[in-house]
Amino acid sequence: MIVNLLIKMKKLLYISGILTFFVLMSFMYVDFFSSMTKVDYIDGSKTLKFTTKMNTSHISDAIKINPNTAGFEAEVKKYVNNNFDVFVNGAPKTITFTGSQVSGETVWVYFEAGGVSDINTLKIRNTILLSAFPKQINLVNIAYKGNQKTMNFQRGKEVNEVSF
């Protein structure tokens, strides 16, 4: 009888140890990989203005440069030009980098595409941070003449298109 009680207690301790392990694992630090881009159409200048928000350490890791160094903005510009393409009505548009700003854990990147008179379709290739972080998700919210559209980019879905 005492032996049976000891065996049951040993099983109970074993099971409670496994449960405790899983509970503690659920509190592990998990890094979230995402960027958010807002696209606004400026009718007066016929321009698409892009504002991208991303994690400072993530972009710093991807371009392999410290955000506090003088060359950081130039590397961010090169990185965005290589990882973000815009096509309006099937025609590629040139992206002009207009600046960036490091604000603690966030980097804001500003760029634009001019000569956009009317949009029927907007196609974007967004591979920002996708090669550096497999679980990266990039969201793009577009505001065009009162219409709102959202695009989602991740590995395997680097190109997206919306119609207006």
Image (tube, grey):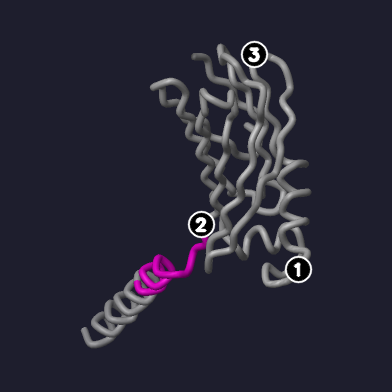
Asked if the magenta segment contains residue 27, the reply would be yes
Q: Nearer the viewer, mark 1 or mark 3?
A: 1
User: Distance from label 1 to label 2 (Cα)?
Assistant: 27 Å
Q: Which residue is mark 2?
A: 32
Q: Amino acid at mark 1?
A: Ala
**The magenta segment:** 20-32
Q: Which residue is mark 1?
A: 70
Q: Is residue 36 left or right of residue 127?
A: left
- Residue sitting at 77 percent across and 41 percent down? 82
8 in relation to 113, above or below: below
Discs 3, 2 touching: Cβ within 8 Å: no
Q: Quadrant of residue 72?
A: bottom right
Dot 3: element:
loop
Find residue 41 and report its horizontal and vertical position in percent.
52, 28
- Is the N terminus in the top left, top right, bottom left or bottom right quadrant? bottom left
Q: Nearer the viewer, residue 113 or 124?
A: 113
Q: Quadrant of residue 83?
A: top right
User: Distance from label 1 to label 3 (Cα)?
Assistant: 38 Å
Q: Looking at the image, how many numbered discs can be counted on the residues?
A: 3
79 in relation to 162, above or below: below
- Give whichever of discs 1 and 2 has the lower sequence position: 2
95 in relation to 27, above or below: above
Q: Is residue 22 left or right of residue 121?
A: left
- Give whichever of discs 3 and 2 has the lower sequence position: 2
How many residues crowd mark 3 within 10 Å: few (<14), some (14–19), many (20+)? Answer: some
Q: Which residue is mark 3?
A: 89
